[in-house]
């Protein structure tokens, strides 16, 4: 019996104890291995998160996509004649014109009776032998002013650069006496228009809402003209103060002397 016990002790010391020690060491590594595996998984996940994502195709524009210009006003749809054919807009005369991109802000006034020279510091209605045109109705509103600083001068300056292509898309605001603001977008710039009656054929024949602006390209009454055509975008409400500017224009200091006693726009 003693021999057997001694033999077992010898076997344990020489064989089993080293094996038990190795097994214990391996068991001790289990928590470390598990922790290491966790760290690897976290790092692997972060690495995957940081990988560049494949570029997606650009979103297709929708009606809800806002543009820089639409954010400015949030314009409602254009008004149109009602079901009965009667106009949904009233006949409201333009009182002010603003072109924000060019720094133009002028009152709109009626031309003086028997005008011989345009007023300064105002834009004027071109009426000829018919009544004023009304913004928003199916017709052309035609306004003109001097090609001077603070008036329509910036239009002429811009027209000389690539035939005015830089003005295409600019917005024009026309206020009316019913406290509304009609917004138009420049769609065409026409240079070197002869000083003749035929130059008004297009605006006089308009059957839709249009805005036409005119200024002279030279100092003489017979100088060629520049025209700007703008089409409507929409209409928003305006305040009483914004739609009724205080300025009414004035006779230019360098205006010629009046040829007749009932002339307008000239110096007496």
Image (cartoon, rainbow, N blue to C red):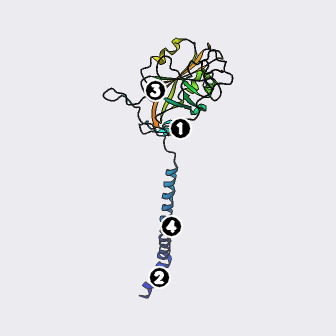
Q: Earlier in the sequence, mark 1 or mark 4?
A: 4
Alpha-carbon span between mark 1 and mark 3: 18 Å
Q: Earlier in the sequence, mark 3 or mark 4?
A: 4
The residue identified by callout 2 is 9
**Residue at point 30%, 27% (across, down):** 84
Q: Viewed as shown, does residue 61 lie left or right of 83?
A: right
Alpha-carbon span between mark 1 and mark 4: 77 Å
The residue identified by callout 4 is 32
The residue identified by callout 1 is 242
- Dot 1 lies on which element? helix
* Residue at the far front in the pictured view: 261
Q: Earlier in the sequence, mark 2 or mark 3?
A: 2
The residue identified by callout 3 is 134
Q: Earlier in the sequence, mark 1 or mark 3?
A: 3
Q: Are marks 1 and 4 in contact (CB under 8 Å)?
A: no
- Dot 2 lies on which element? helix
Instruction: Please name whichever residue, 57 or 74, is drawn nearer the observer in this view of the structure.
Output: 74
Q: Are marks 4 and 2 in contact (CB under 8 Å)?
A: no
* Residue at the far bottom in the pictured view: 2
């Amino acid at each position: 019996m003693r021999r057997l016990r001694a033999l077992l002790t010898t076997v344990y010391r020489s064989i089993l104890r080293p094996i038990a020690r190795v097994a214990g060491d391996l068991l001790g590594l289990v928590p470390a291995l598990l922790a290491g595996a966790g760290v690897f998984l976290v790092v692997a996940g972060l690495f995957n998160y940081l990988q560049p994502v494949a570029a997606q195709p650009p979103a297709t524009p929708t009606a809800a996509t806002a543009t820089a210009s639409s954010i400015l006003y949030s314009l409602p749809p254009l008004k149109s004649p009602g079901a009965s054919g009667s106009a949904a807009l009233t006949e409201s005369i333009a009182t002010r014109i603003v072109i924000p991109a060019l720094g133009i802000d002028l009152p709109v006034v009626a031309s003086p009776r028997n005008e011989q020279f345009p007023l300064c510091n105002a834009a004027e209605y071109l009426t000829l032998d018919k009544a004023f045109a009304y913004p928003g109705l199916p017709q052309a509103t035609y306004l003109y002013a001097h090609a001077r600083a603070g008036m329509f001068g910036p239009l002429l300056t811009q027209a000389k650069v690539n035939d005015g292509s830089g003005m295409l898309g600019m917005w024009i605001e026309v206020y009316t006496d019913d406290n509304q603001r009609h917004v138009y977008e420049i769609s065409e710039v026409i240079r070197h228009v002869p000083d003749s009656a035929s130059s008004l054929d297009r605006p006089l024949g308009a059957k839709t809402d249009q805005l036409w602006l005119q200024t002279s390209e030279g100092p003489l009454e017979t100088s060629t003209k520049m025209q700007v055509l703008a089409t409507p975008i929409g209409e928003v409400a305006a305040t009483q103060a914004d739609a009724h500017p205080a300025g009414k224009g004035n006779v230019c200091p360098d205006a010629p002397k009046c040829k007749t006693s009932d002339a307008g726009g000239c110096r007496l």
